[in-house]
Amino acid sequence: MSKTLKEITDQKNELKEFFGNFVLNLEKTEIFSEIQKNLTDEVLFVGCGSSYNLALTISNYFERVLKIRTKAIPAGEVAFQKVPDLKEKGLAFLFSRTGNTTEVLLANDVLKRQNHRTIGITIEEESRLAKESDLPLVFPVREEAIVMTKSFSMILLSLMFLADKIAGNSTERFSELVGYSPEFFDISWKVIEKIDLKEHDHFVFLGMSEFFGVSLESALKCIEMSLTFSEAYSTLEYRHGPKALVKKGTLVFMQKVSGMDEQEKRLRKELESLGATVLEVGEGGDIPVSNDWRSAFLRTVPAQILGYQKAISRGISPDKPPHLEKTVVL
Ligand code: F1P
């Protein structure tokens, strides 16, 4: 079996175990109290590629539930451009699955020099990020494929949970969503299997706030695995120019949010009239899931499956994306 497919599929059963063994215990760890103690009014979230998409999604959720200001910045910009000075030196979360991406390590140096307290989020205990950040948070996830899949979902789930815990909110909804994850996986697989992927060569992912980060990540999955032209936009932005490219053969994934039913319905109708196939993810959608922002950790799964299935339909191995390496070392 392909490594990438195995890791995508692992989520179906591993999420529950991971939630019970790791996420529910986060609150008792030293890192939790350190984050709680050092949380300032402004927090930075930094990463590259999928890890940047992760940083962006989590930054939106921290801002939402903790009512602080956050900024997500690609690590390359922190490393090589001046980062705007914060009012006070605060926390900076640096994300890197492999923990050895050059720009992230350089960003860690820059931020430490500016007296930020850096939190290194990675799955590799022996990585430089784990060793060089002030507070490493190493996730107990094994992922070998070049394309980041299950670790994205697991880290996202954990940090959203952590934000709610710090805010003193109920975390019950996470248990429900984790319980729903095997069914969500199966529905996603079946819905995507029914689409004639040979007839679709342009993928568009639409979402707002946390679901915009999810959409960026979705597009990246399809580019990396299946080499298909894929784009992501904040939902209503799509009307402002990008829709010029819609045609028969465009597949649009719309991430539904609360309070937008009417707008979503109208946009779907418009895109379908231009020839696109539209799938909605969310309450009452083609791939049903709660509209709660906490569902973000599940919402890249359909695109992971899509990227995989499209690659297979084109005779491409998702395990060997051309020109890509697991860690970009400059
Ligand atoms: C970041 C990353 C990956 C991407 C590619 C190159 O890696 O951009 O997201 O798929 O393989 O590296 P990391 O810093 O999260 O290890």
Image (cartoon, rainbow, N blue to C red):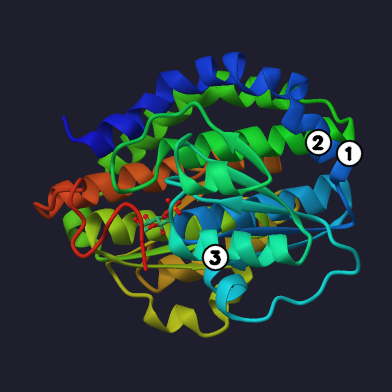
Classify mark 1: helix, strand or loop.
Answer: helix
Q: Position of residue 177 (x, y in %)?
A: 61, 26
Q: Position of residue 201 (x, y in %)?
A: 25, 65
Q: Residue at x 43, y 40 (%)?
A: 301
Give yes or no for contact between labels 2 and 3 (Cβ–Cβ under 8 Å): no
Q: Please tell me the numbered disc located at residue 162.
A: none
Q: Position of residue 236 (x, y in %)?
A: 62, 70
Q: Nearer the viewer, residue 208 or 86?
A: 86
Q: Please tell me the numbered disc located at residue 34.
A: 2
The picture quadrant for ligand 1 comes to bottom left
Q: Is residue 57 above or below residue 28?
A: below
Q: Is residue 221 visible?
A: yes
Which residue is disc 3 drawn over? 106
Which residue is disc 1 drawn over? 37
Q: Is residue 26 above or below residue 79?
A: above
How far apart are the two marked residues, 1 and 3, measured between alpha carbons? 26 Å
Q: Is residue 51 left or right of residue 196?
A: right
How far apart are the two marked residues, 2 and 1, measured between alpha carbons? 5 Å
Classify mark 2: helix, strand or loop.
Answer: helix
Q: Quadrant of residue 112?
A: bottom right
Question: Which corner quadrant holds the N terminus?
Answer: top left
Give yes or no for contact between labels 2 and 1 (Cβ–Cβ under 8 Å): yes
Residue extending farthest to the left is: 315
In the image, is the residue at mark 3 within 8 Å of ligand 1 by its beta carbon?
A: no
Classify mark 3: helix, strand or loop.
Answer: helix
Q: Nearer the viewer, mark 1 or mark 3?
A: 3
Residue type pointed to by label 1: Lys
Q: Earlier in the sequence, mark 1 or mark 3?
A: 1
Q: Is residue 172 above or below residue 131?
A: above
At label 3, counting other C-alpha atoms closer than 10 Å, the crowd grade (few under 14, some 14-19, many 20 or more) is some
Q: Quadrant of residue 28?
A: top right
Residue type pointed to by label 3: Leu
